[in-house]
Image (tube, coloured by chain):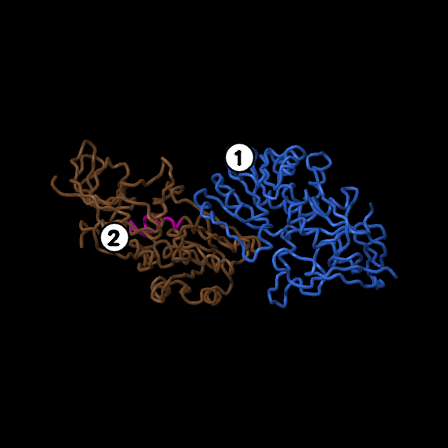
Chain colours: A blue, B brown
Amino acid sequence: MTETNQQLRLAAFPKGVPQDNDFEVTIEAVPNLGDGDVLVRNHYASIDPSTRTSWVDTGSFHQAVKLGMLVNAGTGGEVIASNNPAFSVGDMVMGGPGLQDYSVTDGKTLQKIDIDLAPLTSWMGGLGITGLTAYFGLLDIGDPKPGETVVVTGAAGAVGMIVGQIARIKGARAVGIAGSDEKCKFLTDELGFDGAVNYKDDLYRGLKETTPDRIDIVFDNIGGPMLDTIMRRLAMRSRVIISGATSQYNEPEIYGPKNYLSLASFRARMEGFIIFDYADQYQKAREEMAGWAKEGKLIFKETLVDGTVGDFPAVMRQLYAGENIGKMLLRLPGAPR
Amino acid sequence: MTETNQQLRLAAFPKGVPQDNDFEVTIEAVPNLGDGDVLVRNHYASIDPSTRTSWVDTGSFHQAVKLGMLVNAGTGGEVIASNNPAFSVGDMVMGGPGLQDYSVTDGKTLQKIDIDLAPLTSWMGGLGITGLTAYFGLLDIGDPKPGETVVVTGAAGAVGMIVGQIARIKGARAVGIAGSDEKCKFLTDELGFDGAVNYKDDLYRGLKETTPDRIDIVFDNIGGPMLDTIMRRLAMRSRVIISGATSQYNEPEIYGPKNYLSLASFRARMEGFIIFDYADQYQKAREEMAGWAKEGKLIFKETLVDGTVGDFPAVMRQLYAGENIGKMLLRLPGAPR
């Protein structure tokens, strides 16, 4: 083949917010297919705040992402050639070795997706790992009961917007915390959240107003001092679900929740989870979420940014700056417009 | 009556470690008994690190301990006069309005204790709130399984020494963290702990050596950076029980656990509890613990310091300096020697 393949590789372990020169664009020929190989043209790259956590020099041989390796962003695209009976040209797939225009693999890391159920962008968001994180974190760790109050941080983000909507499907009240009035309006007016608070205003006051019966479940994607403020509003026997700490991934030292002793005062618990533990239940969860989407109870939303693989660091900085609503995806040149 | 009653009152909200001039000794005549009243001569005052947490000016009308009020230490002693049919002269009791030589009450806050089961000092320690804290925190929140590893901080203290012993009774391994080699030796040689680490040495290294299968349950009485170090050794699905944070009670700002994100990596939870929620089960727990004590499986230990009510702040400072082994009690002049 004569097509060239643009790839993004890690060139340095970022200090703070990832900069362009922490990465290097390499250009290779698209390799020929061997027996059993599949060629995918990637359409989208997933922009996830937690990807940043693997770009730390642990000094370990087992380090997941080493310098020179492809950047570990999730990708999704279309099979354009296949020597593998499990894949046909035109299949839409997710997965692969990292961020590049084309991938050639043996297909083992590829997941075929059903675009009759939902488009690829939804599969990379609401039906992807971010949506599954919302689903299993909220339902398995939080276990919301009708009438309980769920507060979610990063509420207009890929995970948060699903958390609040599923909370409401389960009969709980959903209050979202987000970083702009526009996002708050989106949460209440378009997604049906019961309340939303712009954390750039007076967060504690906003929480008091929107959670009159205090907070039964916190679904935290952000961490930092925001979590401390929220923990002042815990209800008895509340659950604090630790999903992520986006505010901390670029910091040299993690901010620990100073109000953790309120776990005792409120007989509360703080609990973490790893989404991969639920892998055998993904399919069932996706079918349930797709069903809710068809009924109009669950809305998926993506922010698409057009660019090449080299634009990935800039789009990631937009994510950290809170410029997305819903799942943020880099739309690569190969994607249909 | 012509006896005088020495009392200790809060004179100022302490900044940092409580100082003598944060308190005031007052001397009153012992009041005459009204109908239904009970006169108790106190023998012991309980020295508990958490008492400090109520000496903070919250500005609230409902503040538990206001300036001028009796210091809220637990007391235990003997009934020496009674107009209340529920109490007889010679009864041993715990409870009362605060720290003083004599108390006159209507008996409602007094608990009669059975000295055939254990002496008063054990009732104020192992069978008292500290022992119950160990019992319910470990068994209800931690739920140790045979072969699991339990690490307890403040292990040579009133709560910690009971935690480790009950862990062993339940078939778990007990590793204690304490502040001197002498305390560590006491834990392993006298109480049968499987391991002990002096945190003034290399704590992480000591934990690695004593918890080869990592840590299933943390029972934390201390907080601060020590908890962070321990959380680096969590096992999958581990439980971090938040009982207290003695290292933080004198600090202007609580140190939050920076490693709280490892709750996610290890599918772990951090959970608090309030001992008073278990009040209807105290009696059963005390009988079980007293039974273990009679069988020699559970050892109670107290550090008694002789003094008057005015010595309370100094003894409390000794506690914060780690000079006690087991429950620390101020032995008042009225106590039998």
Give the quarter of the image for residue A140. top right
Q: Mark 2 = which residue?
A: B330
Between residue B329 and residue B299, name the one nearer to us. Answer: B329
Amino acid tagged 2: Leu
Q: Position of residue B127 (x, y in %)?
A: 32, 50
Q: Chain of mark 2?
A: B
Is residue A2 something that shows in the picture?
yes
Q: Mark 1 = which residue?
A: A211
Give me the residue at 36% from left, 35% from top. Answer: B61
Spatial separation of the CA atoms under disc 2 and disc 1:
45 Å
Q: Quadrant of the N terminus of chain A?
A: bottom right
Is residue A284 something that shows in the picture?
no
Q: Position of residue A80 (x, y in %)?
A: 85, 54
Q: Residues within 10 Å of mark 1 (few under 14, many from 20)?
A: many
- Kindly report the secondary structure that dominates the magenta region of the rendered protein: helix
Which residue range is magenta in the image? B118-135
Q: Secondary structure at mark 1?
A: loop
Do callouts 2 and 1 point to residues on the same chain? no
